[in-house]
Image (tube, rainbow, N blue to C red):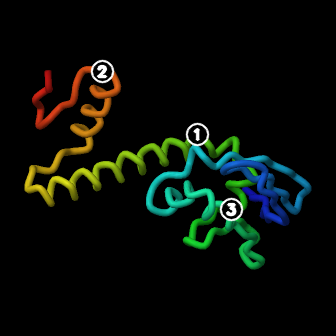
């Protein structure tokens, strides 16, 4: 199977977390990056000032940010096909980051660490208005 080699040739910032990207094959794609801005690498790009410091790497022919974040040019070229998987990964990264923060907080306060399932259940309960959950106990 032969894969096309895509190269980003230009880009324009068109909105918050949105870029219009031009490719060597003439394709233009407007990409909303907001759904994938989670985790330790892409999460910092939620800072609009950092996001807007994007540049075109002349050697890799792709978009890069000062914190080291980048995307494969083929992923950018075929963004609609990749977005569902990338957004799901970002959701998991966000949940993982939340778990780590809660574990650090628990460690500092000498509380037992919670599993990811416990954290997700607590968040779902809070969103449903069922009260906050503490160690399996619900508040009134």
Ranked by sequence position, the earlier of labels 1 and 2 is 1
Kindly identify which residue carries mark 3: 52
At horizontal 80% and vertical 64% (from top left) the residue drawn is 8
Left-right relation of 140 to 21: left
Q: Secondary structure at mark 1?
A: helix
| Residue at position x 78%, y 64% in the image | 5
Quote the CA–CA distance across marks 1 and 3. 24 Å
Q: Residue at x 36, y 53 (%)?
A: 97
Instruction: Report the front residue among 85 and 106.
Output: 106
Q: Residue at x 77, y 56 (%)?
A: 13
> Which residue is nearer to you in this view: 105 or 91?
105
Which tag is nearer the camera, tag 1 or tag 3?
Answer: 3
Considering the image in quadrants, where does the N terminus appear?
A: bottom right
> What residue would you read off at disc 1?
84
Element assignment for label 3: loop
Mark 2 highlights which residue?
Answer: 129
Cβ–Cβ under 8 Å for marks 1 and 2:
no
Q: Quadrant of residue 66?
A: bottom right
Q: Position of residue 88 (x, y in %)?
A: 49, 42
Discs 3, 2 touching: Cβ within 8 Å: no
| Position of residue 109 in the picture relative to residue 124 (left or right) | left
Q: In the rendering, at what x and y percent does residue 132 appear?
A: 21, 30
Looking at the rendered structure, the secondary structure element under dot 2 is loop
Pointer 3 local density, CA inside 10 Å: few below 14, some 14–19, many at least 20: some
Q: Is residue 28 left or right of residue 89?
A: right
Residue 45 placement: quadrant:
bottom right
Relative height, residue 116 to residue 70 (above, below): above
Report the residue that reaches farthest toward the bottom.
Answer: 59
Where residue 47 sits in the image (x, y, percent)?
56, 58
Q: Is residue 9 above or below residue 111?
A: below
> Rounded to the nearest whole Å, what is the CA distance between mark 3 and mark 2?
37 Å
Q: Earlier in the sequence, mark 1 or mark 3?
A: 3
């Amino acid at each position: 199977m032969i894969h096309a080699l895509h190269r980003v040739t230009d880009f324009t910032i068109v909105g918050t977390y949105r870029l219009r990207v031009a490719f060597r094959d003439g394709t233009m794609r407007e990409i909303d990056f907001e759904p994938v801005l989670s985790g330790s690498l892409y999460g910092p790009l939620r800072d609009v000032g950092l996001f807007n410091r994007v540049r075109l790497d002349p050697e890799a022919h792709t978009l890069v940010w000062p914190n080291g974040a980048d995307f494969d040019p083929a992923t950018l070229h075929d963004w609609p096909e990749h977005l569902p998987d990338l957004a799901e990964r970002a959701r998991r990264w966000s949940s993982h980051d939340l778990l780590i923060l809660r574990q650090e907080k628990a460690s500092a306060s000498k509380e037992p660490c919670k599993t990811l399932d416990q954290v997700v259940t607590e968040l779902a309960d809070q969103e449903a208005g069922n009260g906050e959950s503490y160690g399996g106990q619900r508040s009134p």
